[in-house]
Image (cartoon, helix red, strand yellow):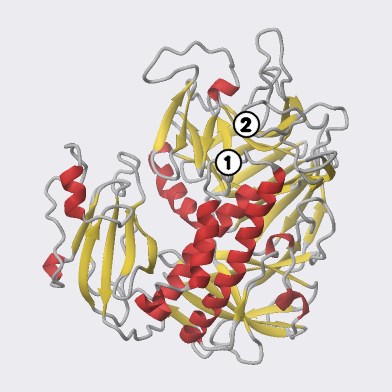
Amino acid sequence: PAFKRFVRDTSSLLQVVRQIVAIAAGPTAFDDQAVQSLAEAQGVAQHHDAVSGTAKQHVTFDYARRLSVGRSQALRSTSYALGSLAGGDGFTICELRNVSVCKPTQEGDYGEILLWNGLAQNRSELVELPAPLGNFKIYDTHGKEVATQSVPSLPSITNYGRPAGGSNTTVLFKADVPALGYQVYRFAQGAESKQEASEPKLQHNEKDSRVVLENDYVALHFVNNNLEAIMDKETPSVKRVSQSWLYYEGSTGNDESDQVSGAYIFRPNSSDAKPIITGAPNLTVVRGSLADEVHQTFGSWISQRIRLPKDSRHAEITYTLGPIPVGDLIGKEIITRFSTDISNQGECFTDSNGREMIPRKLDWRESWKLNQTEPVAGNYYPVTTSIFIKDDDAQLTLLTDVAQAGSGCVREGELEMMVHRDLLVDDNRGVGEPLNETEFITPYVGKHQGQHYGRGLVVRGRHLLTLTNPSDASKVWRPLQDQLYMDLLPFFPNQAAPTYRKNYTALAKALPRNVQLVTLQPWDKEFLLMRLAHQYGKGEDATLSDAVTFSLEGLFAGQVILEVQERGLAATISRKEVLSRRISWKIDGEQDRKPLKQESHSKDLEVTLGPLQIRTFLVKLSPSPSILVV
């Protein structure tokens, strides 16, 4: 992935590492230097000139190197901790699985896959693994064969378009994984199957024909090889949703202003985006028992897969884009646009760091009168996880796996996201070089300092797209938001020492649907740090947005909570001190709540969370965890 996606993926990995170490080793692992090295690298990457994309290229390379080293070191500690839970002799992950590179499944004749679920709810989802074309079989813990489907892999290339050596075939299977725990599956190649083989069923589509992907909940309609409409079968409602790939030319200054578009500034030279290609894209249809897909190519440097799993309420779009051609010496800012007949009245909603949804209106600011001089850029907003437009009948929501920029306010009924940029002029805001990432760069000393050369950057990312009734939208996209951030993570044990415990959950009871365990990690020699979060905003859902009360008693499998201390969000000060500093205002769900006491009696372990509230606790557990097998 590009650097922003690398940071997002590492954030998810860090949470999983902390969970596994906390569960397996408890507070005694609080000073684990390997885990700390990853936390420090991830912390440095949050610098305002790091994840923002406003560092010189050699500095960005160094940020990425630090993350890579931190991941490698932390995974060694995780391997040991996971071994104490599951058995086995060491675990690894496939760091390049997103480009279809995974040595255990590509080269091994048999083995095990341990899927870790970092969320506090059970999950049933499709998992994809690179595999040779042929009899690649998956078995559950009882030896029963699990249904699989083979599909073409996405292009196996590096960040700069070089061959990555990945498999041409990907195997899908549906996994059921318990909350905050794992499930083991076994794979074998060349085994005789008791099920009908599900090999890729490819159909190269003619440009004047129609294609429909559908399941019990959603139908995607393609006309002239482009997505043109989505049907929500539960409403039922059909909306025009026409996707296109376009680009804005980056401004190099004009009569109105000499400001150019660059690392800090988005300033197109026109309000009109230009199409990537004229005519229709190429399209191939793939149908199977678990999911239907279309694979599209838009010229020579953009391709995408749109997948509709059989039991999902969303479409998954995975794009591969770049290098952006700039041989014409014109910088380009690439967008994907969804044009609809939703009457959103110039209003869209974007997330605030994955939490509250903020209303945005065309050419409007809440606290001052705006003199709009940039009709496109002035209506663009940061999108960390989600953006939607809606009217009385339908809501179109897009979730992203990486921080991007976008808008649903530039044009009526249109939602667009910027996914890649390549600009050739420095915007004079502090970086000192153009936003033109290439494979190589000359040293920043001597002659030809910091010159970019070699192949341009290729990015890959995912967008999840839902069309629902506005009153039901949040119960669809809010859980998806958590799942997109915290993917099921496959670990591969040493084949010479298979696992002896095939499933595990750290939770003895489920948390409410609208509550997520967002942090679990060692804090000091006695306590674990735990954060609980309400995942729905006020008024988003008729029931799930309500304040929720539940007990911590019996939450952790086989362990008793001996002591609880509520802390401020950062855990550095007590809840009592937070309240003494707080400006007095009313928070939903807190007005009648008593402060949480430290004694571990059931009546004192009740927790109430209002909409989108996060509460932080230090928890002391009984020292010897017992394993809960599910």
- Whether residue 444 sits left or right of residue 142 in the image: it is right
Question: At 46% from the left edge and 55% from the top edge, which residue is drawn?
Answer: 482
Three-letter code, disc 2: Gly
Question: At 70% from the left edge and 17% from the top edge, which residue is drawn?
Answer: 270
Vertical comparison of 295 with 498: above or below: above
- Judge depth for marks 1 and 2 and give the one in front: 2
Three-letter code, disc 1: Asp
Question: At 78% from the left edge and 79% from the top edge, which residue is drawn?
Answer: 107
Quarter the C terminus occupies: bottom left
Vertical comparison of 382 with 597: above or below: above
Vertical comparison of 46 with 447: above or below: below
Circle 1 residues within 10 Å: few <14, some 14–19, many ≥20: some
Q: Secondary structure at mark 1?
A: loop
Residue 98, percent across and down? Answer: 69, 60
* Residue at numbered disc 2: 430
Question: At 26% from the left edge and 74% from the top edge, which residue is drawn?
Answer: 620
Looking at the picture, tell me which residue is in the foreground, 527 or 185: 527
- Whether residue 169 sits left or right of residue 236 in the image: it is right
Q: Secondary structure at mark 2?
A: loop
* Residue at numbered disc 1: 49
Of callouts 1 and 2, the N-terminal one: 1
Asked if residue 317 can be seen in this view, the reply is no
Looking at the picture, tell me which residue is in the foreground, 490 or 202: 490
Mark 1–mark 2 CB contact (< 8 Å): yes
- Whether residue 429 sits left or right of residue 34 in the image: it is right
Circle 2 residues within 10 Å: few <14, some 14–19, many ≥20: few
Residue 69, percent across and down? Answer: 63, 65
Residue 467, percent across and down? Answer: 52, 41
Looking at this rendering, what residue extends furthest in the top direction?
255
